[in-house]
Amino acid sequence: MTIRLHRRRGVPRRTNRRLIGVLLGAVLVGLLAAVGAIGLAVAAPARAVTITVDDGTGAPSSTAVRTGASRVSEVLARAGVTVRAGDLVEPAQDRSVGSDDAIRITRAMRLDLVIDGRPRQITTLLRTVGQLLEFLDLPDGSRAVVPDDRELRTAPRPLAIATPKRITIAADGRTRTVRTAAPTIRQAVTEQGIRLGPRDQIAPDGTRVPTVDLRITVTRIGSGPAVEQREQIPFGTEVRQDPTRFAGETTVLREGRPGEIVRIYRTRTVNGEPRDRMLVGSRTVREPVSRIVSVGTLDRPGRPAPARPGLGGLGPLRPAPTAPAPPAPGQTEQYSLPRQPVPGQPRPTSPSPTSPPTSPPTSPPPAPKPTSRPTSPPPTSRPTSPPPGRDTGATSRGDIEGTEAAASLR
């Protein structure tokens, strides 16, 4: 480095030399400081530090690191360990560390508690139930549902805690009032020497935490001796179809027989008094035999179809009148023909069906003999009553022929 000094006129030469010495000294001091800092940094050795973290949920975890940091906070920052609010760091974060030192971090734990039925939440560094009971400053004799040496990380959540209180227990016809800090109702009952059977009932629920002036009732549930009772098993009916028999015809092929079963009952008792029966078992003595019935499925023969309502334009057909019976032996057939008017005499009027003729003719005309006999058998007797709408007199041959014609149309 070249320094040029221009001497001014009137400035002594000795003053220039002093100024040069000051500048050279300052430069030399700066160089020595820089070299010293670099030397110290190079000469500082890396430290081996063990970091242990206890989060309360399991065994503590440990990690070994090598660092050149000299303070706890710097070591934790370089190792990527975060310190949360409430955590305990040992030694403190502003302390320095040396080689082979150890840093321990105890994580704060959040707990859900139920103290005498009231919920509560706390954050603590404690690790056992006993330490927690001392920390909460509860009355003497307060107890949790687990022993005092139980670790909090394995305790049930929420953790139930009970303080001493007065309760009343009614059991076996006796009522007693005691003071207890039992964490559950069932435990409060058993601590008084009351033995509970597998079917005995406690009210309120035995898993609840006792409260002040609580009344507890124990109900004894028992059973009487076993009683056997024989009962019948009803039989069923099996229906078989028979295509060879007409529908509606039923035949019993085999009669049924009921079975027999033995049922075993016990009487349930409540506080020694019988209440109801309980079925506890059964065994079958005889199986039932089903009844077999045969039922016909064959259709019956068809019946003649009914008469048609009419025939052409003749209208509905009416049943033919009954043919007259043939004459008895020794009798002759008689036919009455329509009367013929006599010349010179007035023509008679036709009589109504309900009244007789007004005046009979003076003399009947000669009745001609029939030229041919009817095709139907001769009547044996005259009908007892005339057909509706006919004269009450003798039946004419024309009437007989009209009846036979109607019968032939049918």
Image (cartoon, rainbow, N blue to C red):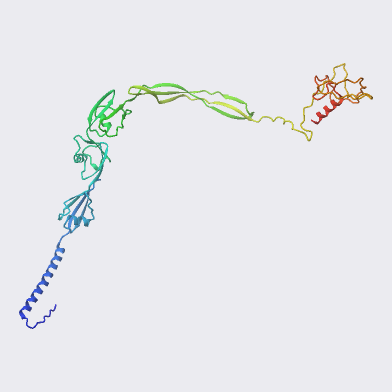
Residue at the (5%, 79%) spot, across then down? 14
Residue in view at x 22 percent, y 56 percent:
79
Q: Nearer the viewer, residue 336 or 125?
A: 336
Q: Is residue 366 left or right of residue 4?
A: right
Q: Position of residue 109 (x, y in %)?
A: 24, 45
Residue 148 relative to residue 312: left or right: left
Identified at 28% across, 29% down, the residue is 215
Q: Is residue 375 visible?
A: no
Occupied quadrant, residue 224: top left
From this view, report whether residue 149 is shown above or below residue 5: above
Q: Residue furthest top?
A: 330
| Residue furthest right in the image | 344
Any part of residue 15 in sight: yes
Q: Quadrant of residue 385?
A: top right
Q: Position of residue 211 (x, y in %)?
A: 26, 33
What is the quadrant of the C terminus in the image? top right
Placement of the N terminus among the 4 image quadrants: bottom left
